Amino acid sequence: MKHTICTALLFGIFVCTALAGGEPVKDAPSVLRLASGKEIKVLSITRTTLHGSDEPAVSLQYETTISFQDMAKLWSEVEQVWAALRPIAEQQKVHAAVVTANQPASSFLPLSKGAGWAWKQRADGSWGAPPESDHARVPK
């Protein structure tokens, strides 16, 4: 959980950058059905590079209705989104991926909030969170 919160806070700083860059992934879905049966609205799936490197990555932005105050519930949803994104990342032949959950903007505050998480593929083919020392963790 500590990793999740640290990653979310770090990534939150860079969420605006993720919205600005990247090349759309061809034939990317606009809706993903998660393992739980829930459908989520995809805002974008792009091929980008990670900040601090030229490492290619796939970045998925989606809209969530879960409060960022309930990090355990949000993390559960993000894990399901990652499971749906992983085949796309592997098809794109990248070894890094980022999932960003966005709360919709309200009519009162026209800015939305976002938090994100990164995964990197290890030498053995498995995926996991990048080490804290890896500064190439967020999209440019």
Image (spheres, rainbow, N blue to C red):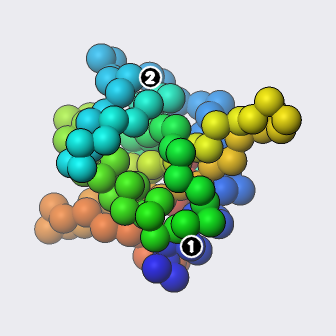
Q: Residues within 10 Å of mark 2 (few under 14, many from 20)?
A: some
Residue under the point 46% across and 79% down: 1
Callout 1 amino acid: Ile
- Among the 4 quarters of the image, the one containing residue 89: top left
**Mark 1 and 2 residues: CB-CB less than 8 Å, in contact?**
no
**In which image quadrant can residue 37 be found?**
top left
Q: Compared with residue 20, is residue 77 higher up or lower down, i.e. above or below?
A: below
Eyeballing the image, is 30 above or below 137?
Answer: above
Marks 1 and 2, how far apart at CA: 28 Å
Instruction: Pick whichever, 15 or 90, lies toward us.
Output: 15
Give the labeled residue for mark 2: 24
Q: Which residue: 25% across, 63% down?
A: 127
Number of numbered discs: 2
The disc, 1 or 2, on the residue closer to the chain's N-terminal end is: 1
Depth check, front residue: 38 or 17: 38
- Element carrying mark 1: helix
Residue found 38% across the figure and 23% down from its top: 30
Relative side of 65 to 119, left or right: right
Q: Position of residue 44 (x, y in %)?
A: 48, 29
Rendering coords of residue 74 (x, y %): 47, 60
Badge 1 is on which residue? Answer: 5
